Structures are given as structure tokens and as C-alpha cells.
Image (cartoon, rainbow, N blue to C red):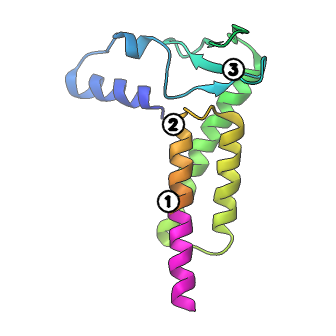
């Protein structure tokens, strides 16, 4: 889930109201994607979570575009894969795990803007995997 969805669900479940503040209804600043139209722009999602637009000079409106749907699906798949890899680390690590984690982090970097919350999650996973592998190698050697 995105930080916005988590925040809104928490407020709905625990405070019994649907927040309509500017932070919840405005641009989702925690989930920007890279703009395919201009290459270096930032796509933000509107409060409706169905409309995306580039805040750079191109001003691309990605509402209903196929490319953005693919990016969103890829982002959701990445979030699931990162969660899966994080969960699998509790059962141990082998030498193939860190390269898999690095591949996922590379895909996050390609699809998501550096401000996206998945970057933090992916780099955290890289750190956990690397330290776990280092501990295992030190115990063997």
C-alpha cells in the first residue's frame, strides 16, 4: 500500500472519518513516477488516484494513458516482490539473494522517481540482505 492509502485507512478505521485535507486530496508526494513523455519530469498522482500529470515543463496529462497503467502495475508488482524478498530473509539467505535484491532495486530506480517511497524500501532491503550475507560469510570463514 502507498503511504497515503495507509494514512487514510488508519484515520478511517481508528478515527471514523475520511480525511479530505489538502495532503490527502492533493498530489501524492510519496509516490512520484518518472515521466515517459519528457524523460526527466515527475509524474504525480492526483487525489482521485486515477489521474496523473507531469509537474515539469511538459505538463503531460497521463489520465487514461496505457503507459502509466503499465508503470503503476509494475510499481505494485515491485512492492509485492520487495515484501516477498523481505519476508524470505527471515528464513535465511543464500548467495543468490543479494543479486535478486539488487535487480529489484534497479527496476525501482528505472520506474520510480527518487522521491518515491519504494526507493527507501528497496535500499533498506539491500542493506538487510547485504548485512545478512556478510554475517553468514563471516560465520563460514
Q: Does the magenta stretch include residue 131?
A: yes
Which one is in front in this view, the residue at disc 2 or the one at disc 1? 2
Marks 3 and 1, Cα distance to the nearest angstrom?
33 Å
Q: Is mark 1 on a helix, strand or loop?
A: helix
Q: Is residue 92 visible?
A: no
Q: What element carries label 3?
A: loop
Residue at the image position 64 percent from the left and 33 percent from the top: 112
Q: Nearer the viewer, residue 3 or 55?
A: 55
Residue 117 numbered mark, or none: 2
Relative side of 23 to 71, left or right: left
Residue at the image position 70 percent from the left and 23 percent from the top: 69
Mark 3 — residue? 41
User: Which of the 4 quarters of the picture holds residue 43?
Assistant: top right
Q: Is mark 2 on a helix, strand or loop?
A: helix
**Which percent across, then down, holds residue 85?**
57, 58
Q: Nearer the viewer, residue 42 or 96?
A: 42
**Which percent across, then down, holds residue 7?**
35, 28
User: Which of the 4 quarters of the picture holds residue 108?
Assistant: top right
Mark 1 — residue? 87
Disc 2 to disc 1: CB gap under 8 Å: no
Magenta span covers which residues? 128-141
Which one is in front in this view, the residue at disc 3 or the one at disc 1? 3
User: Mark 3 or mark 2: which comes first in sequence?
Assistant: 3
User: Which of the 4 quarters of the picture holds residue 101?
Assistant: bottom right
Marks 3 and 2, Cα distance to the nearest angstrom?
17 Å
**Which percent across, then down, holds residue 129?**
55, 65
Q: Nearer the viewer, residue 91 or 23?
A: 23
Residue at the image position 53 percent from the left and 12 percent from the top: 46
Amino acid at each position: 500500500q502507498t503511504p497515503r492509502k495507509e494514512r487514510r485507512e488508519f484515520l478511517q478505521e481508528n478515527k471514523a472519518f475520511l480525511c479530505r485535507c489538502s495532503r490527502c486530496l492533493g498530489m501524492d508526494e510519496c509516490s512520484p513516477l518518472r515521466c515517459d513523455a519528457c524523460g526527466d519530469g515527475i509524474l504525480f498522482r492526483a487525489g482521485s488516484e486515477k489521474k496523473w500529470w507531469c509537474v515539469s515543463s511538459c505538463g503531460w496529462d497521463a489520465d487514461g494513458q496505457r503507459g502509466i497503467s503499465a508503470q503503476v502495475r509494475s510499481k505494485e508488482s515491485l512492492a509485492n516482490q520487495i515484501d516477498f524478498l523481505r519476508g524470505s530473509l527471515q528464513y535465511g539467505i543464500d548467495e543468490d539473494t543479494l543479486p535478486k535484491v539488487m535487480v529489484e532495486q534497479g527496476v525501482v530506480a528505472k520506474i520510480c522517481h527518487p522521491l518515491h517511497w519504494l526507493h527507501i524500501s528497496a535500499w533498506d532491503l539491500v542493506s538487510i540482505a547485504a548485512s545478512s550475507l556478510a554475517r553468514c560469510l563471516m560465520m563460514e570463514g
